[in-house]
Structure formats: C-alpha cells, structure tokens
Image: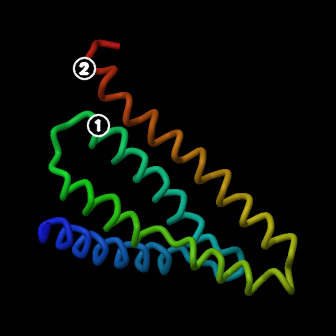
Amino acid sequence: MLRNYLAVFLGGCFGGIARYGLSMWINDAHTMLGTTVVNVVGSFLLTFITYGIAVRYDVPDWLILGLGTGFVGAFTTFSTLGLNLVRHVGSEPILACAIFALNLLLGLLASVGGYWVGQLGERWRRGW
C-alpha cells in the first residue's frame, strides 16, 4: 500500500513539473494554449497508459497508479481551464466558449488516438 502512495506522490511531482514547464514554454495567456495542450496530451497519455500499457503488458499496479493517477493526474489541469474560462467569459465570451469546446473535442480525439496507438502493439504482435 505504501508503494502505491509513493508512486502517486512521485508521479504527481513529475507531472506537476512537466505541466508547469510545458505551459510556460508555450503559454499564451490570451488563448490559453498551454492549458489546452497539456489537457490534450494528458488525454492521450492516460488512455494510452490504460489501454496500451496496463492491458498489454505485465506492469505492476503501483507503476500504473504512478503514471496514470500521479503523473497524468498532476499534468492535466481542468481546474486551470475553468479558472481561465471564468477569467475570460466576461470580456470574451465567444473565445471562452470556443476554448472550452476545443478542449473537449481535442481531448476526446486524443483519447481515441491513445486507444488506437495502444492497440497497435497488439496488432504488431499478431502480425496485423
């Protein structure tokens, strides 16, 4: 049990640092691009970890918890998306709604992509 908590803790540390670094590298406060990118990448990663790594390989549960709940959980940032939307909805309601819709649509597409890429390993193993 302690291993699970430690894995989530360490994954969360690295996920938070990765989110901050990526957001700072591409951040555009007006369009919230950094937040959108981390949410889309996180959607892909969580689905890939769940359906590509955890299902296909004999990976310990603590590692999946560390990668999924820890790293991706800290990497993605729905709360920052909400904060940015509230900040912009009064002055730029159309932009705020567009960013929200873009996050949902791209996040869903990234999840589908993560699932598809996760399935590639199985297809390769079977020879397509």
Q: Does 80 sit above or below residue 116?
A: below
Q: Position of residue 30 (x, y in %)?
A: 71, 80
Q: CA distance from mark 2 to mark 1?
A: 14 Å
Kindly identify the residue that appears in the image at 51 percent across and 72 percent down: 77
Q: Examine the rendered structure and indicate whether residue 53 appears above or below residue 45.
A: above
Residue located 26% across and 69% down the image: 8
The amino acid type, in three-letter code, at marker 1 is Val
Write the residue at 41% across / 35% down. Answer: 117
Residue 55 image-quadrant placement: top left
How many neighbours does mark 2 have within 10 angstroms: few (below 14), some (14-19), or many (20 or more)? few
Could you tell me residue 59's position as x and y percent? Answer: 17, 45
**Residue 63 versus residue 89: which sits nearer the camera?**
63
Q: Position of residue 11 (x, y in %)?
A: 26, 69
Percent position of residue 35, x then y = 57, 72
Q: Which residue is mark 2?
A: 125
- Crowding at mark 1 (Cα within 10 Å: few <14, some 14-19, many 20+): few
* Residue at the spot of label 1: 55
Q: Secondary structure at mark 2?
A: helix
Query: Label 2 is placed on what type of residue?
Result: Arg
Q: Quadrant of the C terminus?
A: top left
Viewer-side label of 2, 1:
1
Asked which colour scheme the image uses, the reply is rainbow
